[in-house]
Amino acid sequence: MVGGADHTAWVMPTHIVAATGIVLNDAGEFLMVYSPRRGWVFPGGQVEVGENVIDGVRREVMEETGVEIDVGELCCVASNTCTHPGYNGVREVPTKIILTFIGRAVGGVPRPSEENTESAYVPAEAVAERITSPAMRETYQAYLEYAGRPVYLEYVTRPVYQLRVKRLI
């Protein structure tokens, strides 16, 4: 017992940490990936155990697109605070923290991967119309509004998307 409380039943909170890259090339086009499950999104994914977040976003972008990036500013911190039943042996998918960085492409050519069927540079004027995920729309809006201070978003995606908090941090 610590401080008089019985902690034998206490479960340490678990969060998935993910990193996303809003990556632009020299022509000002945005690197995006397409998968039938998620539609068009910015590349990213879970940070691995023992990996730092900057290396995680670089690795995820490279794995998903074949593009090497320089990682710049953090423009958005998002908390998906819902949990939901897991799959493939995972009992429950926990709360997720997603850190979105602005990046610059420095090498490679977009190509599909095991996680997506297409990777491409998308002209700025076509990005918003391609994004169908409400959470990704909010992240893109945070990028557009970025003026030196990251945006914090809190939302749930299940049973339906609901934005709960949006503010500068």
Image (cartoon, rainbow, N blue to C red):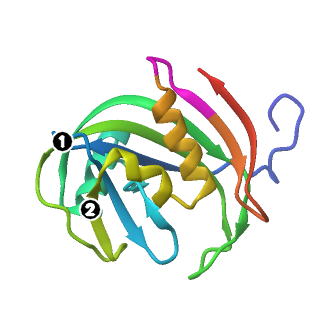
How would you rate the neighbour count of disc 1 (Cα within 10 Å): few for under 14, some for 14-19, many for 20 or more?
Answer: few
Q: Is residue 141 above or below residue 48?
A: above
Which residue does the numbered mark 1 point to in the structure image? 27
Q: Nearer the viewer, residue 12 or 114?
A: 114
Residue sitting at x 33%, y 77%: 117
Residue sitting at x 52%, y 75%: 37
- Note whether residue 47 is visible: no
Q: Nearer the viewer, residue 105 or 59?
A: 105
Residue sitting at x 48%, y 50%: 128
Residue sitting at x 51%, y 68%: 38
Q: Earlier in the sequence, mark 1 or mark 2?
A: 1
Q: Position of residue 49 (x, y in %)?
A: 40, 53
The quarter holding residue 46 reads: bottom left
Q: Is residue 6 left or right of residue 70?
A: right
Q: Is residue 102 magenta?
A: no
Q: Is residue 94 left or right of residue 75?
A: right
Q: Is residue 157 left or right of residue 6?
A: left
> What distance separates the C-alpha of mark 1 from that of mark 2?
13 Å
Q: Predominant secondary structure in magenta?
A: loop
How would you rate the neighbour count of disc 2 (Cα within 10 Å): few for under 14, some for 14-19, many for 20 or more?
Answer: some
Residue type of the residue flagged with mark 1: Ala
Q: Give the label on residue 120, or none.
A: 2
Looking at the rendering, the stretch of residues picked out in magenta corresponds to: 147-152
